[in-house]
Image (cartoon, grey):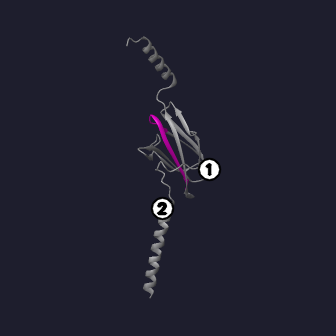
Amino acid sequence: MLKKLFGVLAIVFIISLFLNTAVYAANKVDIYDPKTPATEQTIFVITRPEGKEATYNKSYEICGYTKKEKVTIELLILKDSKYVELKDTNGDSKWTNVGPLFAKEIVLKEEENFIRIVAYSENNPDEVQISDLTIKYVKKNVVDKIKEEIYDALNKMFSLR
């Protein structure tokens, strides 16, 4: 009788453990999926960049401050239809116990860089903040572009084609 009771309790325990794991996994957010929407900045406030920006510098500093304690921040970049880790100039892409100020320098690729900043507090790891940013790296500066346009216009005017 005692063996049957123990067996039934073991089965109930295993089933409940399985169900809790399934429910817990269903609530997790896929931070690497581009279809996952951005959320409000409740954990980490980004001060730079402010949404979409363009720069002539190949390196760029992402800045902000935390609103909670024991915050973990992760940088991702969109590559081949999926977000992957984006390493800073020191080779890191994830930082724990960030606070209260945060600043990391990254190297941009040419054209648009679709960056995702993921933040969560160790005190409440189920609350995940996702912020999507676009930083456009313009290789040539305005003066170079104007010179190029003038040169092209003069070539067209005086060429013997």
Residue 84 in view, yes or no: yes
- How far from the left and from the top, in percent, is residue 152? 44, 18
Circle 1/circle 2 CB separation < 8 Å = no
Residue stretch rendered in magenta on the structure: 106-121
Image quarter of the C terminus:
top left
Quadrant of the rendered image containing residue 124: bottom right
Visible in this render: residue 107?
Answer: no
Q: Quadrant of the N terminus?
A: bottom left
Identity of the residue furthest to the front in this view: 161
Residue 121 versus residue 161 in the image, above or below: below
Q: Residue at x 46, y 20 (%)?
A: 148
Q: Residue furthest bottom?
A: 1
Say which of 38 and 55 sits in front: 38
Q: Residue furthest left?
A: 161
In the rendering, which numbered label is found on residue 25? 2
Q: Residue at (48%, 30%) from the top-left corner?
A: 138
Residue 115 among magenta residues: yes
Residue 67 badge: 1
What is the magenta segment's predominant secondary structure? Answer: strand
Question: Is residue 92 found inside the magenta-colored segment of the image?
Answer: no
- Amino acid residing under circle 2: Ala
Picture coordinates of residue 34 (x, y %)?
47, 48
Numbered disc in front, either 1 or 2: 2
Give me the C-alpha separation between circle 1 and circle 2: 26 Å
Question: Which class describes the residues within 10 Å of circle 2: few (<14), some (14-19), or many (20+)?
Answer: few
Q: Nearer the viewer, residue 36 or 68?
A: 36
Q: Secondary structure at mark 2?
A: helix
Which one is earlier in the sequence, the residue at label 1 or at label 2?
2
Query: Which residue is drawn at the image coordinates 52% and 46% (left, top)?
Result: 117
Give the secondary structure at mark 1.
loop
The amino acid at mark 1 is Lys
Label 1: few (<14), some (14–19) or many (≥20) C-alpha neighbours in 10 Å: some
